[in-house]
């Protein structure tokens, strides 16, 4: 198989990232800019292309594009999903248009449904997409894993309170829902604070996160075992990936949305003996993206890709290497009205450098200070190099590269849209 060492999402938010996986497009093109926008019905996707090419297709699990709509989506012959995030216990699923509450732990429930679908008799080639809720917060492990990490000592990351030189919005977010003192700890009856004792609650959250992932590992094993029993393992392309990364205290933040490395890095492994022999595993170091999934899957299945995709197939990259592979990529995040302490973000990352700024940000220059990091010398992004005279040329170079990436993907002028997901007035999220 193949491990992609440097795999990234291009928007670290559930719905925009999932739309990019399906479409092979950046968010500014597919227009799913928040977690309340549905995947456009007329937009091409790789499941629809496979379905049109004679494949039987299935989706099982968390869809999360359109918070209040769980109806079957175009491109899938079999559909099992639910509204919003779902729950670890007692989720109401829409099973091909029929709603039913399935008992048991979510990860096992969707795995049962996926394995049952795999074992159906069929004559067509097939696509199965399985979307887990785990490890989305609040983290609730299944009982057998609840205490497996209790003896592991956990401290805050070294960057948690090292915010010198960082934009003001990061410091503001520290005390909000997505900050390290925020309420992503549902077992607490009060907000955490900055006393040393608060780390106990951070450690409990981290252990619960790790424990919740164990069941996802079990799910992957079940699917691989089922394919082996069916005699289809070596004829199947398997991709295991996340739709976004996760901040766990780095820079004083939790959750995602930002362009920090923990937020944008995703796990990504591939098994496909048709391209890479199982006895010759390899690691790919180049920059690969969620956008690449659609063209990769379609090429592996012998189905033509829709025109003008932003992503690229990995076939040549994983087989022989690709000297013309991308040297940079664009990151974008669009302001969400329900989480007002994270501004619009646009950035560019190369193998060594990262530049990110906040276009059209409100407030003064300190709140929306741009960021520049030398990832080779500073992989944890602790020293913001913006404003250093020695880096002025590098800033201009990366700004030009960001403009090029926007222009080549259809944006002549980056006019950041207003969020349309939430209309009502929302309370101040800061901890008092």
Image: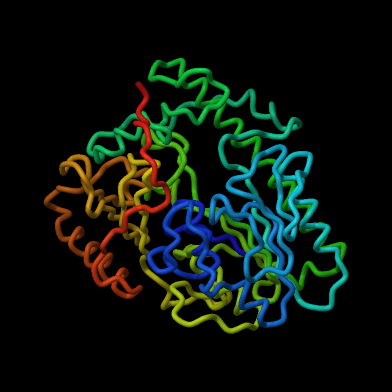
244 vs 45: above or below: above
The residue under the point 31% across, 69% down is 406
* Residue 327, quarter of the rendered image: bottom left
Residue shown at the point (65%, 75%) measured from the top left: 275
Scheme by which the image is coloured: rainbow
Image location of residue 333, percent across then percent down: 37, 54
Residue at the farthest front position: 424
Horizontal and vertical percent for residue 317?
A: 52, 74
Compared with 258, 280 (above or below) is: below
In the image, 347 versus 41, the foreground residue is: 41
Q: How many marks?
A: 0
Q: Quadrant of the N terminus?
A: bottom right
Left or right of 105 on screen, residue 412: left
Looking at the picture, does residue 250 appear above or below residue 299?
above
The quadrant of the rendering that contains the C terminus is top left
Q: Tell me residue 395's x, y (percent).
A: 20, 58
Q: Nearer the viewer, residue 108 or 246?
A: 108
Residue at left offset 34%, top offset 49%: 335
| Residue depicted at x 32% and y 48% | 377
Which residue is the extreme one toward the left?
Answer: 389
Q: Position of residue 96 (x, y in %)?
A: 74, 60
Query: Along the horizontal axis of the image, is 2 left or right of 181?
Result: right
């Amino acid at each position: 198989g193949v491990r992609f060492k440097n795999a990234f999402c291009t928007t670290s938010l559930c719905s925009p990232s999932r739309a990019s996986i399906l479409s092979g497009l950046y968010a500014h093109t597919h227009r799913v800019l928040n977690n309340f926008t549905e995947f456009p019905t007329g937009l091409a996707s790789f499941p629809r292309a496979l379905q049109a090419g004679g494949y039987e297709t299935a989706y099982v699990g968390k869809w999360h594009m359109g918070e209040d709509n769980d109806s079957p989506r175009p491109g899938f012959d079999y559909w099992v999903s639910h509204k919003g995030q779902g729950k670890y216990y007692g989720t109401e699923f829409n099973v091909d248009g029929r709603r039913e509450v399935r008992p048991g732990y979510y990860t096992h429930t969707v795995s049962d449904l996926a394995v049952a679908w795999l074992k159906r008799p069929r004559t067509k080639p097939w696509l199965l997409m399985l979307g887990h809720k785990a490890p989305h917060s609040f983290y609730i492990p299944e009982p057998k894993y609840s205490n497996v990490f209790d003896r592991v000592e956990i401290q805050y990351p070294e960057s948690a309170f090292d915010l010198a030189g960082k934009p003001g919005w990061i410091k503001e977010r520290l005390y909000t829902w997505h900050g390290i003192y925020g309420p992503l700890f549902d077992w607490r009856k009060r907000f955490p604070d900055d006393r040393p004792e608060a780390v106990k609650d951070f450690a409990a959250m981290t252990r619960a996160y790790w424990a919740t992932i164990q069941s996802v590992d079990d799910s992957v094993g079940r699917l691989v075992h089922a394919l082996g029993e069916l005699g289809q393992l070596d004829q199947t392309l398997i991709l295991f990936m996340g739709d976004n990364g996760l901040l766990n205290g780095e820079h004083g933040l939790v959750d995602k949305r930002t362009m920090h490395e923990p937020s944008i890095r995703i796990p990504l492994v591939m098994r496909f003996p048709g391209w890479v022999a199982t006895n010759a595993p390899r690691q790919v170091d180049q920059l690969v993206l969620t956008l690449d999934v659609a063209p990769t899957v379609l090429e592996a299945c012998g189905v033509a890709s829709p025109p003008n995709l932003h992503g690229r197939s990995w076939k040549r990259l994983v087989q022989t290497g690709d000297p013309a592979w991308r040297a940079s990529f664009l990151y974008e995040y669009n302001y969400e009205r329900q989480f007002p302490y994270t501004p619009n973000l646009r950035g560019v990352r190369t193998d060594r450098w990262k530049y990110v700024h906040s276009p059209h940000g409100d407030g003064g220059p300190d709140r929306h200070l741009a960021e520049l990091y030398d990832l080779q010398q500073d992989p944890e992004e602790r020293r913001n190099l913006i404003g250093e005279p020695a880096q002025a040329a590098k800033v201009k170079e990366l700004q030009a590269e960001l403009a090029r990436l926007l222009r080549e993907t259809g944006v002549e002028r980056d006019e950041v849209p207003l969020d349309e997901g939430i209309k009502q007035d929302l309370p101040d999220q800061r901890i008092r």
